[in-house]
Image: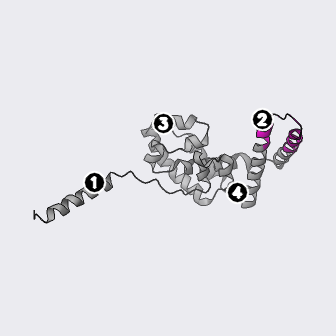
Amino acid sequence: MNKLLLPVFVLASLLIGACSSQPEPEPESQVSGAKWLDAAQGGNMYDVLAYPLTEDELAYFEDALPLLEQAARKHPAIWSEIAYEEDPSVVAAQSRVWSDAGLLGQDVIAVNLKLTFLSEFASAEEGMERDMRENLAWLEQRLEGEGADAALFETADSLRMIIGVIAVNREAGSFQFYQENQARIEAALDRFTSIGEQ
């Protein structure tokens, strides 16, 4: 090899080696509101649910299912931890399962939360929302007095957030979208729930 080209070849080899050892970048988020599942954001599931489900998000979730099934088979212990964890922020934290599937845990869990919310509330009677509003009014009266229990404040905050999320989703047509796509949504939820059981 020409002595002049040797340093160029060595430098190019080093650069290629350095580039190939860089970790894969995380995929970009494709789900609105998913950022609220990052513990550093300080959000919660109600913050996610304030962003109504879109057709693209449902399609993303459906496309993610076979990838998740494969990754869960590869990492059954990690998937078991994910499946039994109750805190959505912990579940959504990027783990080996999400990385191997090429997905952001935040995106998958955000769509799952939206689908579950629609499944539970789309067919709820209007009386349920009225009952929530009445319960909230009753709680707010109790909170005006001295020595109100902290649990009452938490319950009132939760009711406010649920009522707000219902209103946002109703205005966005999410409940109508659910009715039109109910079989598809329920099939996706069932398939997600059964991951790791194969």
Label 2: element kind: helix
Mark 4 sits on what residue? 174
Label 3: element kind: helix
Mark-to-mark CA distance, 4 and 2: 31 Å
Mark 3 sits on what residue? 78
Find residue 174 and report its image quarter.
Answer: bottom right
Mark 1 sits on what residue? 17
Q: Who comes first in sequence, dot 4 or dot 1?
A: 1
Asked if 26 appears above or below 198 in the picture, the reply is: below
Q: Residue at x 56, y 49 (%)?
A: 106
Q: Amino acid at mark 4?
A: Ser
Q: Which mark is in front, 4 or 1?
A: 1
Can you give x and y, in whole percent of width and height, for residue 26 in the image?
46, 53
User: What secondary structure predominates along the stretch shown in magenta?
Assistant: helix
Q: Who comes first in sequence, dot 1 or dot 2?
A: 1
Q: Which mark is in front, 2 or 3?
A: 2
Q: Amino acid at mark 2?
A: Ala
Label 4: element kind: helix
Span colored in magenta: 134-156
Q: 10 Å neighbourhood of mark 4: few (<14), some, or many (≥20)? A: some
Whether residue 5 is visible to the viewer of this picture, yes or no, is: yes
Mark-to-mark CA distance, 4 and 3: 33 Å
Label 1: element kind: helix
Q: Who comes first in sequence, dot 1 or dot 3?
A: 1
Mark-to-mark CA distance, 4 and 1: 49 Å
Can you give x and y, in whole percent of width and height, for residue 41 in the image?
61, 49
| Closer to the camera in the image, 150 or 194 | 150
Most extreme residue toward the front is 146
Mark-to-mark CA distance, 1 and 3: 31 Å
**Location of the N terminus (image quadrant):** bottom left
